[in-house]
Structure formats: structure tokens, C-alpha cells
Amino acid sequence: MAGPLAPPSRHGSAPARVGRAAIAGALALAVTVSGCAWRLESEPLVTPSPDAATLTRDAAARREADVVLALARTASTPGEGVLYDVAARVAPLHLELLGGVYVPFPGATPSPSAAPPADPTPVSLQDAVTAARDGALADAFADSASPAGFRAGSMGFTYALTLWWAQQVDAADGATQDGATQDTTTADTTPAVSAPVTVRALPWSGTTDATVPTVPGASAVDATALADLAVMHDEARFLYEVVAARHEGQERTDLMARAALHGARGDALVALAGTDLRTPVYELPDARVATAADAATACREVEQAIGWRYMELTWGTDATDRAWLMDFAFDAYAASALLPGFTTAQIPTLPGAAS
């Protein structure tokens, strides 16, 4: 800092005689002006200008924060109860993974992308979760191959599955209220295994193709990974056929239909991979299907494992491959949800991500 004292000589010696009064006056002046002088010479604190990736992350964090904020309200239907159960578990973890809502430095005004809403009243949890789903999936498909795109796809998938399951729960509750009271006095109240037949695509606002998803004729996904996935489907086919043999009527028909669906999907994946690693039979301990409850658990676990693997394969993929991989992941998880014994605890927090 410049001041009234003369600089040292070129050899570092002090200037020739300076009186005590001059030194005292100089120190007094330095003390008087130092605060002002330093503030003038220092650069003012400036809020950093976020790049596109930061803006995307900020918006994602704000959506997750909105979900957390919406948890302050109370669920009024069984379906809303599903939303609360899952959102209370996953939204704080999603927000932590994103690094929280961005503020450049303590006391600073948040960047525009992270600014709090003008109305502090929380939106409904349904609206907050829907916005989180749609925003995350839009981010995933816009930047599919990046790690951030994978993370966004995993988060959005969880909310898509949660919203869909909440709708199923409310629909079932409405049907129960409209219909006759069910008799639950029988000794065995475990429902028979009735597999879902309808193939479901990932539901979100960005969906443009309502047709049943199919395995494409070409893909950039690793051929060995596709061949392994075909084996998983074939193992599922085998399991469903074994379980079907122990059922009758509509349950048997539905189980065989789901078995056929897994078989056909395995065929398509083999054709896509160009390699067939399937075997005629697979090991299936009798204990896994000893009772209807055991069989339902086995089918749920197989479907969830397939869904998880599809989500794993979205790492580094382009948007075209992401679309069909996420569709089939959703179909597998939806199938598991419609089997007896499914609970919201089985909805994954970050499907496809390493634990």
C-alpha cells in the first residue's frame, strides 16, 4: 500500500533521519486511511457466472428442494402416501448428490437458477414430483452420454415409477371402495401369482411415441452386454414357466404370457447382439417357488434385476439407445410392482447406479 514513508534505498538501507513527529504522523495517517484505501484497491466480490452445466445442476437441485419443501403437506389418499414414502427417502439423497442448492458465497444472493420462488407456499407433492421427473428426464435425454445425464436419468426414472405406482394404488383403492367387501377370513390370504401382461413404456411429459417399445434393429450398446441381458430374460422365461405349471386358470394364462414376452425379448436381443449365450434350462432351487409368496418374490426379484441392468446400460449411451433401455427398465419394474408383495421400499433411489 502506498504511503507517506519514503521507500527503502536501493541497497535496503533506511532513509536518512526521519524525526519522531514525522513517523508518528505517518502512522496516524496510515491508520486513518488504511480501511478505505484497502477497500478501494481490493476487487469487489462478484457472483460467478454459471456455465450451462452449472445452470442445469442448479435447476435440478431446486426441483429436489421443492420436493422436500412439499413434504410439509399431508397425504390424503393412498397414492399420495406412496409419493410421501418415496419422496421422503429419495429427495434428500438426490439433493445431497447434486450438492445442494447453489449459493456462490455465504450471504450472497443465490444465482438466478437457484433463486427461491416468489411464493413461499409449497406446491403439492404431486406437482413437485412431476416437475422433478420431467426436468430430470429432459436433462438426461439432452445430455445423455455424460455422467450428469446418467444421474439425471436415474433420478427421473425413480420419480416416473413412483408417480405411476401412486396412480395404480389410488385406482385399486377406488375399485375396492366401489366394489363389495372382500372376504379375508380364509386360512391362506396370500394371493396367487398373476403376472402382468401389458408392456409399459416410461411415462413422462416428454414421451412422444405411445407404441409398445421394441428392441431396435441396431444399437451402440456393447454386444456382450446385450447377450448377457438376453440370458437374464431367458432365465425369467424359465422361472415364469415353472411358476405357471403350479397355477391354473387365468393366473396360469397370465404367467405363460409373461414367460412368452421374456422369451421373445431374449430372441430379439440375441439377434441384436449376434451372440447366443442362453441354455436350455437354468438352476432354480425348489425353495424359491415352494409357495405362492415365494414364487411372487422370485418373480419380483427377477424383474427388478432386469430393470436395474437396463438402467446400468444407459451409462454413456446416446438418447436413441437411452429411450428403449429406459422403456424396458420401466416395464420390468412395473411388472414387479404388480406382483403380490411389492412395497414402496422396492422403488430404487438411483436405479442402475453403483452402490
Image: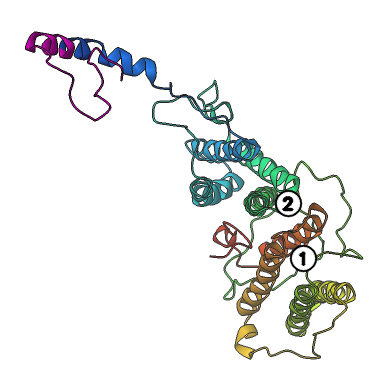
Residue 124 on image: x %, y %: 58, 34
State the SS at label 2.
Answer: loop
Query: Is residue 177 at all visible to an observer of this figure?
Result: no
Instruction: Tell me the quarter of the picture where residue 192 sits.
Output: bottom right
Residue 138 on image: x %, y %: 72, 43
Foreground of the two, 234 or 152: 152
Instruction: Tell me the quarter of the picture where residue 299 sits.
Output: bottom right
Foreground of the two, 142 or 138: 142
Residue 87 on image: x %, y %: 54, 47
**Which residue corresponds to mark 2?**
144
**Which residue corresponds to mark 1?**
196
Amino acid identity at mark 1:
Pro
Q: Is residue 152 above or below residue 127?
A: below
Going by the image, does 313 lie left or right of 219? left
Task: Please say which color scheme the image uses.
Answer: rainbow
Label number found at residue 89:
none
Q: Is residue 13 magenta?
A: yes
Residue shown at 60%/62% (left/top)?
353
Q: Quadrant of the N terminus?
A: top left
Amino acid identity at mark 2:
Ser
What range of the chain is rendered magenta?
A: 1-27
Q: Is residue 214 above or below residue 86?
A: below
Q: Residues within 10 Å of mark 1 (few under 14, many from 20)?
A: some
Q: Residues within 10 Å of mark 2 (few under 14, many from 20)?
A: many
Residue shown at 59%/57% (left/top)?
350
Going by the image, does 14 lie left or right of 151? left
